[in-house]
Amino acid sequence: MKTRTLFEKVWDQHVVSEAEGQPPLLYIDLHLIHEVTSPQAFDGLRTAGRKVRRPERTVATVDHNVPTEPRGTPITDAIAAKQIEALQQNCREFGVRLFDIDSADQGIVHVIGPELGFTQPGMTIVCGDSHTSTHGAFGALAFGIGTSEVEHVLATQCLPQRKPKSMLIKVAGELGPGVSAKDLALGIIAKIGTDGATGHVIEYAGQAVRSLSMEGRMTLCNMSIEAGARAGMVAPDETTYAYVKGRRFAPRDWDSAIERWKALPSDANAGYDAVVELDAAQLSPFVTWGTNPGMVVPVSERVPELSAMKTDAERNAARRMFEYMGLEPGKRIEHITVDRVFIGSCTNSRIEDLRAAAKVARGHRVSSKVRAMVVPGSQAVKRAAEKEGLDQVFRDAGFEWRESGCSMCLGMNPDILQPGERCASTSNRNFEGRQGRGGRTHLVSPMMAAAAAIAGHFIDVRNWEFRN
Amino acid sequence: MKAFKVHKGKVAPLHRANIDTDQIVPKQFLKRIERTGFGEFLFYDWRRDQNGQLDPGFPLNHSRHKGASILVTGKNFGCGSSREHAVWALDDFGFRAVIAPSFADIFANNCVKNGVLTIVLSEAEVAQLVERATKHEDYQLTIDLQDCEVRDEHGFSAGFQVDEFTRHCLLNGLDDIGLTLQHEREITAYEAVHPAPVRLVS
Ligand code: SF4
């Protein structure tokens, strides 16, 4: 029989129909919903007199808009409140399970899916959100869709999809101390560019990827979209099984699930449309300097010189970028001071991320010039962190400890940057205005963000003085 | 969706690479629960200054590009967030087609669903169109989806490729949920042998 990749196996298992002249129809196992990209989809159903075909495969939560002040504080933004109410109303009307704002399981949709055990190897998962790629860490085929497609999946539990191409990213060796999954993700984007994987599903493999925890794999797959990819995947293994086991919605018939999952990894010699190889030992902590995630350099280096750009178009784009970012070409990254620090988002707000940041923060004080906040990805992460005393470490150091949600990753709630403010952020996008109009975002790992909060400027966390 | 067959319209150039959906429609406008009315928010932070005044330097604000229905722009257009609001904003503003050297996947999908055509031309062809749109007053293009061709009245013409099924749907303005539902028997048969892997009652 023909050898197949992980992606091809999951794909093949979900093709419902392949009619002549039409794209294959793909069955969707799990549909995640949030308040921002779903109201128009439910409206569409109502207008057409359609139902949600499989409410038992659909899960909703509120995350993008929710304030991170203590729960129970009224939502002052009337339009945001209306959007949250619309989701509540739609879930009631169409019979969809909602993890609402006051639920003990509320959180960023890409954090709670895995945490509750919804996300499982071999599944197809979609959500009206580009970072759905996160769930690929479990060996699921998970990708973001637009609102029309949300409506399509609600109505039919299927999506017509052209089969994407496949790309293998193989990372040899091990990440050094102080170098995290986030740095690996940024290093990959630095290498292939923000459109380097457009039209492809990435499979991450190699020793460095195998050694990552599930949290690390999620961070890596999360950023796949920042390289243009449709999805990112990691083959399931013992690390995956150990994470899923015992979670609330994990399979009950565990042995048969394991048996199915064991058949998923790519066959030896399976072919890919593209292959990229990296050596983990060459990577260092990264800091972005521009307004897309591909504009990134190691912390020990400098903002690039204009002469380093190859074309006029690149030079012009870089000039705009320097002006927007308030940076001079050639400036040392470690000399860039920050006003704000944000530790959170679906990229880096899981318990392991908070542990890493707390380890750096312990026994130190946030710089008097910096306002720093920690926003756990979910209520469950928040509880776990509090149980370990991480909240106290952060508070003692002068970080704000907030309620779960997307928060300053995109600033749809009151957590935003003021014009000109500079932020070290563990999120995934440094686009112009992403964290607030005129705001300047530098993407970094949780450890690097915590270190920047304390030092008041970027600093190589490999030289950090850890205190107990 | 709206049908797209042949469209003739004015061109607006915005020659920047990697324009992300956060720029096309900033997040502060994503809270509306309707599909309509997003046009005024298109490129909001670029079109308007801090006080909400139109910036005369921004190409879309030039009087000569007023009423444009075809946007010509740089590579990797529409990258980033999956927000379909970006397409609703372009559509509501009056754009029927976007021409670029490449598009982000989710954005291109979202366009099709709204009857907005994305056309991939080479970097050189895009540069030519930008130059012409800047040089000629009232520069227009004709986009012919039947022949898969873009042309102007000054001798420019270029063929483009579009997926045959997408073309069929656009030409006929088909509702693709309706098309999927024609496979009801196959979907039901699939579900019969693939029970839901998740128990939503714990
Ligand atoms: S945390 Fe940020 S990237 Fe993740 S789902 Fe929320 S807004 Fe999107």
Image (cartoon, coloured by chain):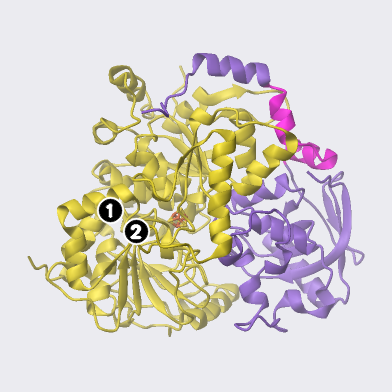
Chain colours: A yellow, B purple
Quarter of the rendering containing residue A244: top left
Of helix, strand and loop, which mostly describes the magenta segment? helix
Q: Which residue sits furthest right?
A: B153
Mark 1 — residue? A382
Mark 2 within 8 Å of ligand 1, using the beta carbon: no
The stretch drawn in magenta includes residue B167: yes
A407 vs A432, left or right, is left
Image marks 2 and 1: residues in contact by CB distance under 8 Å: yes
* Discs 2 and 1 carry the same chain letter: yes
Quarter of the rendering containing residue B128: bottom right
- Quadrant location of the N terminus of chain A in the rendered image: top left
Secondary structure found at label 2: loop
Which residue is pictured at 73% across the width and 84% down the height? B56
* Residue type at tag 1: Lys
Give the Cα distance between marks 2 and 1. 8 Å
| Residue B148 visible in the displayed image | yes
What is the x, y in percent for residue A179?
Answer: 24, 59
Image quadrant of ligand 1 equals: bottom left
Q: Is residue B14 above or below residue B84?
A: below
The residue closer to the viewer here, B97 or A266, is: B97
Task: Give the mark nearest the N terminus, 2 or 1.
Answer: 1
Label 1: how many Cα within 10 Å (few below 14, some 14–19, many 20+):
many
Mark 1 within 8 Å of ligand 1, using the beta carbon: no
Q: Is residue B28 above or below residue A334?
A: above
The residue closer to the viewer here, A358 or A140, is: A358
Which residue is pictured at 29% across the width and 33% down the height? A247
Label 2: how many Cα within 10 Å (few below 14, some 14–19, many 20+):
many
Label disc, if present, on residue A403 of the rendered structure: 2
Secondary structure found at label 1: helix
Magenta-highlighted residues: B163-183
The residue closer to the viewer here, A297 or B9, is: B9
| Residue A276 visible in the displayed image | no
